[in-house]
Image (spheres, grey):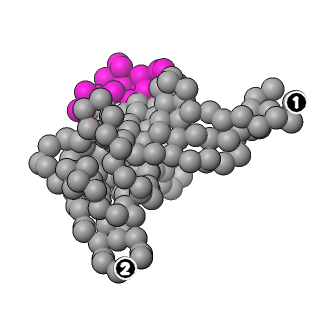
Amino acid sequence: MALTPEKLVNYSVYGGVGSIIFMGLADVELPKFESVTDTIRGAGVGGEYESPVIGHFKAMSVKLKWRAVTSAALGLLAPTHHVLDIRQSVQVQDPMLGALATEAWRVEVRGPSKMLGLGKLEPGKPTDAECEISVAKIIVSKAGVPIVEFDPFNMVYKVNGFDHLRSV
């Protein structure tokens, strides 16, 4: 029987070459995969239909809200592609045994910084400095196995190991 995912236990944000730099404490908003579509209509179609283009998505970004600005977070201002490595621990339940366990999930994002706000200064409070990274590549993995990989510049869109853009 499959394990039942329950909740996110915790996560950390790393970056830099080899994803070894702890970036700081942040709330993270992961991107939404929204397909590029075309409206299909005409003879033989009763109305309209929004047809997604295989492996093509609207612009995506990852948003981070830092509790406090760090030198690593400020490094995201450099005009280059950055690597963010968001490592997660997800609590799961084995319904047969009634036991709890955790699974390692990872989201790797590559892309340039679109925006970095320094936040607000108030004693004893988080600065809520915000950063937005444009997604040029994203890989979502579970226990080291890629589940989703999207790389628009290399025409790669893999889901569970199958590249839906391979024939393109």
Q: Is residue 52 magenta?
A: no
Mark 2 vs mark 1, foreground winner is 2
Q: Secondary structure at mark 1?
A: loop
Q: Secondary structure at mark 2?
A: loop
Q: Earlier in the sequence, mark 2 or mark 1?
A: 1
Instruction: Indicate the amino acid at tag 2.
Output: Pro
Relative depth, front residue between 37 and 90: 90
Q: Residue at x 37, y 52 (%)?
A: 24
State the image quarter where residue 74 is shown.
Answer: bottom left
- The residue tagged 1 is 96
Compared with 75, 165 (above or below) is above
Q: How far from the left and from the top, in percent, is residue 32? A: 44, 51
What span is in magenta? 152-168
- The residue tagged 2 is 123
Pointer 2 local density, CA inside 10 Å: few below 14, some 14–19, many at least 20: few
Q: How far from the left and from the top, in percent, is residue 45? A: 50, 47
- Whether residues under marks 2 and 1 lie with C-beta atoms below 8 angstroms apart, the answer is no
Q: Residue at x 33, y 34 (%)?
A: 20
- Which image quadrant: the C terminus? top left
State the image quarter where residue 54 is shown.
Answer: top left
Q: Is residue 37 visible?
A: no
Q: Residue at x 30, y 78 (%)?
A: 121
Alpha-carbon distance for marks 2 and 1? 50 Å
